[in-house]
Amino acid sequence: MIGLTARLLMAMVCAGLVAGCDVSMTQQRKLTTYAPTDLWPDGTSARPLPESVVAQGDVERTKLATNPPPVTTELLERGRARFGIFCAPCHGLAGDGDGVIVKHGFPAPPSYHVDRLLAAPARHFYDVMTNGYGVMFAYGDRVPPHDRWAIAAYIRALQLSRQTKVADVPDAAEHIR
């Protein structure tokens, strides 16, 4: 059996150990961004990136942004599907700028069939989707580069569909009936 003195001594040791615990795990010393410090010669906690650093995925993303894929049936189908999801609410299914959002009081975007946009390169539509334009939000973080090119190709197909005559398309009369 442990005597009273030993128990008292054990209780005091436990109390001392518990008293040593504090909030240091939740309130740790750290350097916040741009906080001054004497740890480095320049006196700032923010470290410059080494030369030639490229963010992961940037090389491939840049390659996709600068080199549009070849226009294929699959690309146009993908563009039509993505256009219906991301663009049609404002621009309308035919690209006339009469989407459902406009009917609820939002500003109407321009029609894709105006002369200015008919003359614009596909790159213009890609850039507008990436960075936004006017009251249009940027979709660069929501729509991957390949899908932006697919949508741009589909917009071009919408534009061309308005300028084509039935006589210019062989066997079109049979498909229309």
Image (cartoon, grey):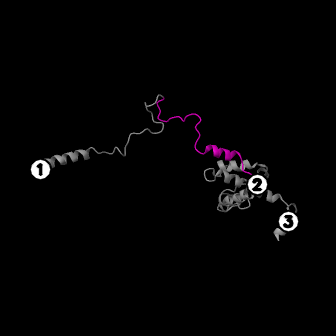
Secondary structure at badge 3 equals loop
44 w.r.t. 101: above or below: above
113 w.r.t. 131: above or below: below
Label ID, residue 147 = none
The residue furthest bottom is 177
Which residue is more in the foreground, 175 or 162?
175
Tag in front: 2 or 3 = 3
Q: Earlier in the sequence, mark 1 or mark 2?
A: 1
- How far from the left and from the top, in percent, is residue 154? 73, 56
Magenta stretch encompasses residue 88: no
> Mark 1 and 2 residues: CB-CB less than 8 Å, in contact?
no
Can you see residue 47?
Answer: yes
Residue at 47% from the left image edge and 35% from the top image edge: 45
Mark 2: give few (<14), some (14-19) or many (20+) Cα within 10 Å: many
* Quadrant of the image occupied by residue 24: top left
Amino acid type assigned to the residue bearing label 3 in the image = Asp
Q: CA distance from mark 2 to mark 3?
A: 22 Å
* Quadrant of the image occupied by residue 55: top right
Magenta stretch encompasses residue 60: yes
| Residue highlighted by disc 2 | 156
Q: CA distance from mark 3 to mark 1?
A: 106 Å
| Residue highlighted by disc 3 | 171
Q: Earlier in the sequence, mark 3 or mark 1?
A: 1
Query: Could you tell whether 111 is left or right of 7 in the image?
Result: right
| Residue highlighted by disc 1 | 4
Q: Magenta segment range?
A: 42-70
- How far from the left and from the top, in percent, is residue 155? 74, 55
* Quadrant of the image occupied by residue 80: bottom right
Amino acid type assigned to the residue bearing label 1 in the image = Leu
